[in-house]
Structure formats: C-alpha cells, structure tokens
Image (cartoon, rainbow, N blue to C red):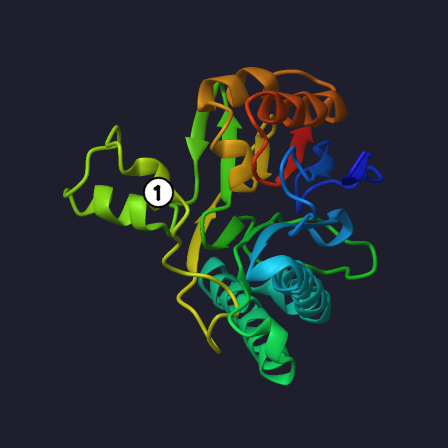
Amino acid sequence: MNSRAYSGQSAKRPLHDWNGIHLRHSALSDVGMVRENNQDSFLAEPEFGLFVVADGMGGRAGGEVASSLAVETLKNEINTRFRELCSSDSQAREIILKQAVNSACLNIYARSLELPNLRGMGTTATALWLPVRNPAHPGQSGSPKACVAHVGDSRCYLLRAGLFYQLTSDHSLFQEKIRAGVLHPESPMASQMKSVITRCVGYQEDEEVDVLSFEPFRGDRFLLCSDGLSNKVSEKEMADLLLEDDLGWVAEHMIELAKERGGEDNITILLVALDT
C-alpha cells in the first residue's frame, strides 16, 4: 500500500483549563490511484496541540520536499515558541502562527534557490492549534481559543452539534472568481480552475496567511485534508462519517471513497476529536 499512516490516540491530556476533555486523533495519507509518489505531508503533535496537512507542488521531487519542509518548520517553530503561544491572547497567538507559516515559506524558498531542480516548488499548509495543557510547560494562562492558520486549498472542517463547517477558504482561482461573483459554482470551467491555487507556501519568501481563532468545545471533531479528498467526497458524506467513533476506520473509509472515485491525486486525512 503506497501510503504513510499513523492512527492512534494520544495520552490522556486535558485541554487548557478544561477538566475531563481529552483529545484523540488519527491520520492517514495515500498516494491514490494515479500518482507515482505522494507529495502530501502531515503532522500530528498532540502534546503541543498542533495538527498540519500540507499538499506539495512543483514536480515529482519539489512537491515532496516542499510539504515535508513545511511540516518540519511548523513543528520546530511551535515547539520552540510553545510557552509563548500558550500564554498569549488570541491576537498574539495568530501572529505567532502566521510567523511560523512564513518561516516555512522562507525555508522552502531558500531551498529552491540552492537546488535548480526544485525551483518554483511550493505547498499548501493548513494548521490547527488547540490549547492543550502540557505537563512540561506548567502555568499556562493564555486564551482558551484554538486557531487555524491556512494557505492554499487544503481544508479544515469542524463538526459541532451535528453541523459541519468549513473553517478555511480555498485560495484557488475557482474560489476567487466565485467570491468575486464572476463564476457560478456549477460552471464547466470549475474542474480546470480548481487546480490553480492563488497562494502557496514557498513560491516566494513570504505569503499572506489566513488565521481564524475560535473557542473549542467538548464534542468537537475536526477534519484536515488535502484536495485529494475534498474533490471526491461530499461534505455530507464527510459529516456523516465523522459521527462514527472509530477515527481510524473513518480515515480509512474516506480514503477508499476517494480512490473508488478515481483517486487522481494524493489523499491525506487528519482527524481530531475532543471527547470526555
């Protein structure tokens, strides 16, 4: 099976200042049915509350390098600044996450200048940070709000009280034209425009990063995914599957649905549940 997978539950770690709420997660990445290599990367760091999906682009080698560098940089930045992140208010926290994404931008761009065969590479980056309580960093007193930082067309969804929300907005030519009111969602041009993204991490030294802060609640479930899933599986199907308790089974079933429907792209899924 041409996939990279991790499926499991973190140690029981209550969320910041919330007794009795625990975090479970599961992740799965698959090459799909057409591509020869997997240019997606993901990161699950429950002890630091960080979850990332990155979908690389820029040729066979470039996409893998870009997405891998993105998740590695985000991990290092958040680990280094974890105490500061936890003690910050939501506005300062958003700035930290933007800076972390742009550190990834700079690292990827610098690597592309070193190696001519990687010129023009880049990646999406969708990161979810949750306010976990880390025993190694006591005395956290910042905002209880979570934060999503986002560039590109990978997505973060939230299932809450039976309602399914897309927390991110795609940075694609298709969505930009829809938002501008010059294209209908059912246009025959959709399939061509969806693959053209208008922002990415690493094509230049820095990029505009979308950020969103919100308060997480007991029972919330999150889905981070590359467009290999969202282009093949409907939001209703995603929401229905997220109601299931076994996150590993949910990830596997979503992958199989995308592959049954063509699987032309790599498919990456990262699931997070906030349980009692």
Between 224 and 48, the one lying in front of the other is 224
Secondary structure of the residue carrying tag 1 is: helix
**Could you say which quadrant of the image residue 143 lies in?**
bottom right
Residue lying farthest to the bottom in this orientation: 114
| Residue 83 place in picture, x, y as percent | 69, 66
Q: Is residue 152 left or right of residue 6?
A: left
Q: Quadrant of the N terminus?
A: top right
Can residue 87 be seen here? yes
Q: State whether residue 154 is above or below residue 218.
A: below
| Residue 99 place in picture, x, y as percent | 53, 71
Between 48 and 52, the one lying in front of the other is 52
**Could you say which quadrant of the image residue 80 lies in?**
bottom right
- Residue at x 85% of width, y 40% of height: 11
- Residue at x 39% of width, y 46% of height: 170
The residue wearing badge 1 is 192
- Residue at x 58% of width, y 34% of height: 222
| Residue 98 place in picture, x, y as percent | 49, 66
- Residue at x 54% of width, y 71% of height: 105
The mark total stands at 1
Q: State whether residue 20 is above or below residue 135.
A: above
Can residue 107 be seen here? no
Q: Quadrant of the C terminus?
A: top right
Between 143 and 274, the one lying in front of the other is 274
Q: Using a 10 Å C-alpha cutoff, classify the residue at mark 1 as few (fewer than 14 neighbours), some (14 to 19) or many (20 or more).
A: few
Q: State whether residue 15 is above or below residue 137.
A: above
| Residue 62 place in picture, x, y as percent | 62, 64
**Could you say which quadrant of the image residue 246 lies in?**
top right
Residue type, mark 1 in image: Gln
